[in-house]
Amino acid sequence: MPSLARWIGLSLLALSTSLPAQADKNVREIVIHSGWGGLGTPQALTVTILGTPDGFQRDGKPVKPALVQALVSAAEAPPISKPDPANLGITKSWLQSHLALVEDQMPGKMQDATARQKAFFESTFTDPEKISGIVPSLFTYTSFDDYPYAEVKIKFSDGSQLTLTSHSYYELMLPWTIDGSNSQETYNADISRAISALLPPKSTNRERLSDAEFGFHLAEAVMNSIDKQWKEIGAEDRADDSIAKLRSRYTISASDINLITAQSLACHGVVTAHTKQTSTSLCIGPTFRRTWRLRAFSFQRPAESRESMSFSKLDHDMRTSRSLSHG
């Protein structure tokens, strides 16, 4: 029993002596280097946040301790190995709340969209499961003449340091490389948001580090992912009868309504039907029967035949399709 009491006493002593060391690990200084290079005027910025007896300060102005703690907590959190919708803040309610905003930011698409096209986009954008499959595309494309960078050094009172770096032009400048006791890469969006909150307004990369434009960029990615179906729905809504006639004779791999081309041709719309052999367009209007081929390629049958494919029947079918009214 005495030995047990002695062990407890020693354990309590060891615990009490370890607490001050942990408590002494306070943030002494945060130095943020943020810059950009590319096609335009290079930008560079250095922001220093100091820990003082009166709290944290940046350029002599107070900084909320919660903002500093948010950065430290995010930097010390377990790494996230790939873009995570939940960490990015994507939830069903978030998607629904951003729907009207992103639609307003895409007037070129939504202004001339049919009701079915809008419904198709909206059902895709507000479906978290579908969005999970689209999110990775925001972190795999290639960009040119856009070279942001950021380096953040967090210095502690015990002499240790964490260094966070990014040269990414992807959303929120993810991923980050964290160098401390070891080096690791993370897609933790909380790091980006915490850094953005510590930067002064209009600082280099401040908007990029926040999620201010994330909803719009996600909407663009959604539109890219549904582009083929979007065009097919638009063509069907405006030229369903003629497309149905073509389908009865041909396999149509894609179809589209080109309203911009239509305006220059005094049409209400242009249906472009892409078959396995050719691409043919039909002018939509109250009395139009005009037809033309956008691309007249010469394809051949398999090697054993070598006989050129004929497009005359397809052209004839397009010409004899009944005239259409604008849908």
Image (cartoon, rainbow, N blue to C red):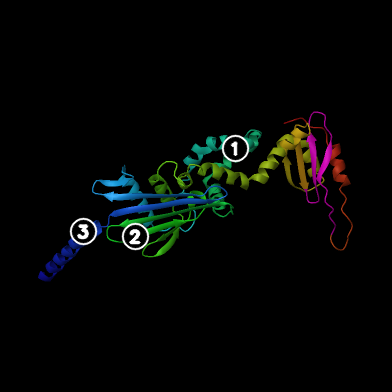
| Residue type at tag 2 | Gln
Residue 312 x %, y %: 88, 46
Element on which disc 2 rests: strand
Against 280, residue 174 (above or below) is below
Q: Is residue 30 visible?
A: yes
Which mark is in front, 2 or 1? 2
Q: Are marks 3 and 2 in contact (CB under 8 Å)?
A: no
The boundaries of the magenta stretch are 275-301
Sequence-wise, the earlier of marks 3 and 2 is 3
> Label 3: which residue?
20
> Label 2: which residue?
161
Q: Nearer the viewer, residue 44 or 167?
A: 44
Examine the image and state in which quarter residue 64 appears: top left
Query: Quadrant where the C terminus lies?
Result: top right
| Residue type at tag 1 | Met
Q: Nearer the viewer, residue 90 or 3?
A: 90
